[in-house]
Amino acid sequence: MTIAMQNYLELIYELSLDGKKARVSDIAKQLGVSKPSVNNAVVVLAKNGYVDYEKYADIKLTNKGRKTAEFICSKHQTIKQLFIEVLNIDEKIADTATAIPHCVDEEEYDWITNNPLGYRKWFNEINAPYKEASKEQFRQAFLSHVMSTLP
């Protein structure tokens, strides 16, 4: 699934929480895209079994869609938490790093969340070459590395 499709699915999930309805017009407004673009994306998600959708009707997640969206949201929250707690990145900046969770595959995500020391151990391993560097120097090097790996 492409990053764009993941973003659509995640937003549909967020809009449908607490009994709210996911509608093409709301998605278009939040993503800053046209309604026909949203409609095309939703048709693709429906063909792949992630949503139930009929033109001019609310968009409903299937079980497959809900599970996938929950996983995507969980990755975003975990990566955001890593940025805030470990790298001391401002929450507003961490919120803008939306492409990074899409680059973390399921195996890496499982390791980050299930490892007894989780991402803190990962951070310390990554930090080893930078022990003499200041926290800010490491932060800049890390972010530069992460950004260079994005598609």
Image (tube, rainbow, N blue to C red):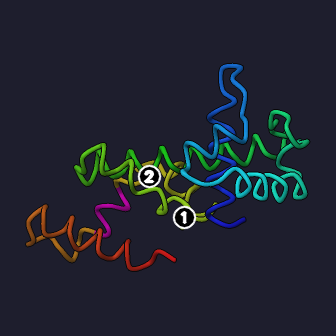
Label located before the other in sequence (2 or 1): 2
Looking at numbered disc 2 in the image, what kind of residue is underneath it?
A: Ile
Residue 104: assigned label? 1
Mark 1, secondary structure of its residue: loop
Q: Nearer the viewer, residue 115 or 51?
A: 51
Labelled pair 2, 1 in contact (Cβ < 8 Å): yes
In the rendered image, the vertical position of residue 21 relative to residue 119, given as above or below? above
Pointer 2: what residue? Answer: 79
Part of the protein shown in magenta = 121-126
**Which secondary structure type mostly characterizes the magenta part of the structure?**
helix
Q: Position of residue 75 (x, y in %)?
A: 54, 50
- 125 falls in the magenta region: yes
Q: Position of residue 30 (x, y in %)?
A: 55, 43
Which residue is at 69% across, 59% downward?
5
Alpha-carbon span between mark 2 and mark 1: 9 Å
Q: Quadrant of residue 144?
A: bottom left
